[in-house]
Amino acid sequence: MKLKNILFSTTLLAIPLILFSNCSQSSSQGKGTTAAATTAPVAKAKPADSTAADTTTAAPVTYPPLNKKLYDSLMKKLAHGDTTGKWPVKNAPYPLPGAILPFKRVVAFYGNLYAKKMGILGELPPNEMLAKLKGEVKNWEKADPSTPVQPALHYIAVVASGDPGKDGKYRNRMPFKQIDSVLKLAKKAHAIVFLDVQVALSNIHAELPLLEKYLMMPQVHFGMDPEFSMKDGTHPGKKIGTYDAEDVNYVSGYLANLVRKYNLPPKILIVHRFTKKMMTNYQNIKLRPEVQVVIDMDGWGEPDLKTGTYRYFIHNEPVQFTGYKLFYKNDIKKAPHHMLTPEEVLKYKPYPIYIQYQ
């Protein structure tokens, strides 16, 4: 299995686009074309408009007690007959009432509204994008009729950049008004929202608390991207970054505190991964009733390479739930020029319960 083709694919794609971003930002003031999870126009965070409250908040909901027998049966189903003993994960706590997983499969569109090349979320006009998302939801419902599908918008709220910015952190924080726009779109589609963070030369302790006003909403969840966590000071896009279990535990602890404080249903935490070093000491990740941790296979390439990456870094190093990313363009670059279908992804062990399209 030639894993290097996929392990370094994102980085190789990123380098020329970072250089392009440096030029386009200075000439177009933030309207230049950017690449997936690599660069974005500079956008300074602004206080959220209080008049947007009716579109970004939800009324309190009382959830029925967790059906533990059903939960156990669904977790066994997700293991898909795995005989290694890794799945389902042992000694994991039951979630609090209102948990989405494993009762529903999440199907998400990923991207940024400023950049058409960062993902399908920003590539298409909003109504066309939502219609396409609805189509993918139907595809997954057809492929696995026994599992309801929850649509989602996965929005990159902090974007690694080729420009150091005023503080030299090589990341751009998107304005709150854009997050509000995503929440409005999600409401139209009955979708949940993920806010994703690429810290670059900043760190997760600095970036996560700035999004608390959104994370205290029941429909908003979180994603962290090790690929652009550059702990050694390397500029993003030059190499693949890393997070440790300690970083994941900080985030899940922070989210758990919000769940308890605001009486929320469990948060879903997405951790992207496609190499071993992207997430170190996975066995030390702490599982909590308030947070459901998904390790998302984030690499692109031909089907055999993606299958190998899922096997080595997702199946073999179990945390709690698994996810899988599909790339409309990058997955078809090499022969056989084919993006996996839902039916093909459902051959994996364990079944991915979070699906992301970029």
Image (cartoon, rainbow, N blue to C red):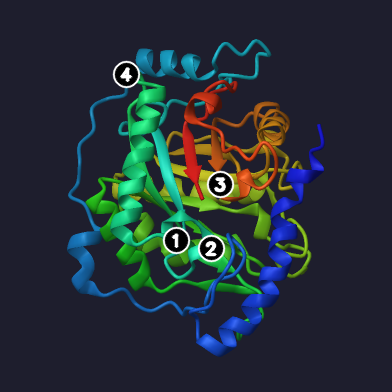
Q: Are the residues flagged by discs 2 and 3 in contact, CB closer than 8 Å?
A: no
Q: Which residue is mark 1?
A: 123
The quarter holding residue 265 reads top left
Q: Secondary structure at mark 3?
A: loop
Residue at x 38% of width, y 32% of height: 139
The quarter holding residue 316 reads top right
Distance (Cα) linking label 2 and label 4: 42 Å
Q: Amino acid at mark 1?
A: Glu
Q: Secondary structure at mark 1?
A: helix
Q: Which mark is residue 67?
A: 4
Q: Are the residues flagged by discs 1 and 2 in contact, CB closer than 8 Å?
A: yes
Q: Which mark is residue 327?
A: 3
Distance (Cα) linking label 1 and label 3: 13 Å
Q: Is residue 26 left or right of residue 184?
A: right
Number of other residues with Cα within 10 Å of mark 2, as a class: few under 14, some 14 to 19, many 20 or more: many
Instruction: Examine the rendered structure and indicate whether residue 14 appears above or below residue 306.
Output: below
Residue 102 image point, x, y percent: 41, 27
Distance (Cα) linking label 1 and label 2: 6 Å
Q: Earlier in the sequence, mark 1 or mark 4?
A: 4
Q: Amino acid at mark 2?
A: Lys
Number of other residues with Cα within 10 Å of mark 4, as a class: few under 14, some 14 to 19, many 20 or more: few
Q: Earlier in the sequence, mark 3 or mark 4?
A: 4
Number of other residues with Cα within 10 Å of mark 1, as a class: few under 14, some 14 to 19, many 20 or more: some
